Image (cartoon, helix red, strand yellow):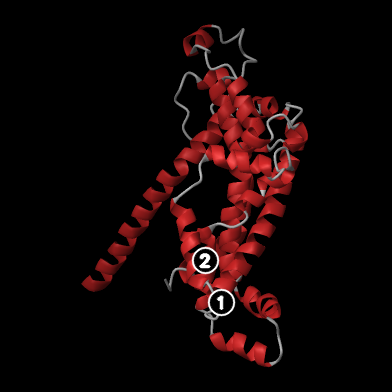
């Protein structure tokens, strides 16, 4: 009886700890959401927790009224979808090649990939290379420079090496080529790890804005959502005195403060990732676990 009570007490303690950790984890996001849905002039008074005190959609209306956002959002979606698909394809093919023991130069290529994880050419050489390749002001500048990440290659390679070698051998005995083996045998079995790297690539494409700033600053047709939102934040007046707002709340009731604008922008850019993640969570966790079993 005492043992049963101790076990139940242990479960209760674990449950309470997990609840506290969940609240700590969710609070920052809920606070941002509440501030984005709260009236700006009221927000400067402070005291907002996880619920808006004076509900309003004015902050989002201010963000969405910018004419460049629809085109920027479309470019970001295209970049994320096209870029992620190409990244996953080339990463998987590279990983498959490196997993083959009969690949000549396998160790050398592995070594060169490892070097890229620790050493970078620098911003200026990268900029000059992009211009020399004719990618400046081109949509493909968002995809080709980051075509393959070494970390993702090693993750997929490790996963493939954990698959039974007999699957490849039996397919080759039946006359299948290397490409056929990859497409019809290996790639379908790599769903967990490909979902994992797809999430990595997709988040990177969606959140990236600095490459737009460097390579497409004057190309309105190539602007991205993150870059436009960054410009909105910069253009928002950061010199508004909270005391002035509180004293003249009635006259400034239509004002959207930089803080409220920032919170609304934060929600706009992270909601798509939050919506997509639950569908990939199962594969993401499985891919991270299985892909790390073998070094």
Look at the picture and state if 268 lies above or below 21: above
Quadrant housing the C terminus: bottom left
Q: Nearer the viewer, residue 151 or 30?
A: 151
Q: Nearer the viewer, residue 105 or 218?
A: 105
The alpha-carbon separation of the residues under discs 2 and 1 comes to: 10 Å
Q: Is residue 231 above or below residue 89?
A: above
Q: Quadrant of the N terminus?
A: bottom left
Q: Quadrant of residue 176?
A: bottom right
Q: Which residue sits at x=61%, y=59%?
A: 198
Drawn side of residue 94 relative to residue 289, left or right: right
Total labels: the figure holds 2
Residue at figure coordinates x 54%, y 33% from the top left: 34
* Number of other residues with Cα within 10 Å of mark 2, as a class: few under 14, some 14 to 19, many 20 or more: few
Q: Name the residue carrying label 1.
A: 103
Q: Where is residue 182? Give x, y as percent.
A: 66, 76
What residue lies at 31% left-to-right and 66% top-to-bottom?
Answer: 8
Look at the numbered discs 2 and 1 and tell me whether their residues touch, using CB distance below 8 Å: yes
- Residue at the spot of label 2: 109
Classify mark 1: helix, strand or loop: loop
Residue 236 in the image: state x and y as whole percent.
60, 20
Image x and y of residue 273, in percent? 61, 48
């Amino acid at each position: 009886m005492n043992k049963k009570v101790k076990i139940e007490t242990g479960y209760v303690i674990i449950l309470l700890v997990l609840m506290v950790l969940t609240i700590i984890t969710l609070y920052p996001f809920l606070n941002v959401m509440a501030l984005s849905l709260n009236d700006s002039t009221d927000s400067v008074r402070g005291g907002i927790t996880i619920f808006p005190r004076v509900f309003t959609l004015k902050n989002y209306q201010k963000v969405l009224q910018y004419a460049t956002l629809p085109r920027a959002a479309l470019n970001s979606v295209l970049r994320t979808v096209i870029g992620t698909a190409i990244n996953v394809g080339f990463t998987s093919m590279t990983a498959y090649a490196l997993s083959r023991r009969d690949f000549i130069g396998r160790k050398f290529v592995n070594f060169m990939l490892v070097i890229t994880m620790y050493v970078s050419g620098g911003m200026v050489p990268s900029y000059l290379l992009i211009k020399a390749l004719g990618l400046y002001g081109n949509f493909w500048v968002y995809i080709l420079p980051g075509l393959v990440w070494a970390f993702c290659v090693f993750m997929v390679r490790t996963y493939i090496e954990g698959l039974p070698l007999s699957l490849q051998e039996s397919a080759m005995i039946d006359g299948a080529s290397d490409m056929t083996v990859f497409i019809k045998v290996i790639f379908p079995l790599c769903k967990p790890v490909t979902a994992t790297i797809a999430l990595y690539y997709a988040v990177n494409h969606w959140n990236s804005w600095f490459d737009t700033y460097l390579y497409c600053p004057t190309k309105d047709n190539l602007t991205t959502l993150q870059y436009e939102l960054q410009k909105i934040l910069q253009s928002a007046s950061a010199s508004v005195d909270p005391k002035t707002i509180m004293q003249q709340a009635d006259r400034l009731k239509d004002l959207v403060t930089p803080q409220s604008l920032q919170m609304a922008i934060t929600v706009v850019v992270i909601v798509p990732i939050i919506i997509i993640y639950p569908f990939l969570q199962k594969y993401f966790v499985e891919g991270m676990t299985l892909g790390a079993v073998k070094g």
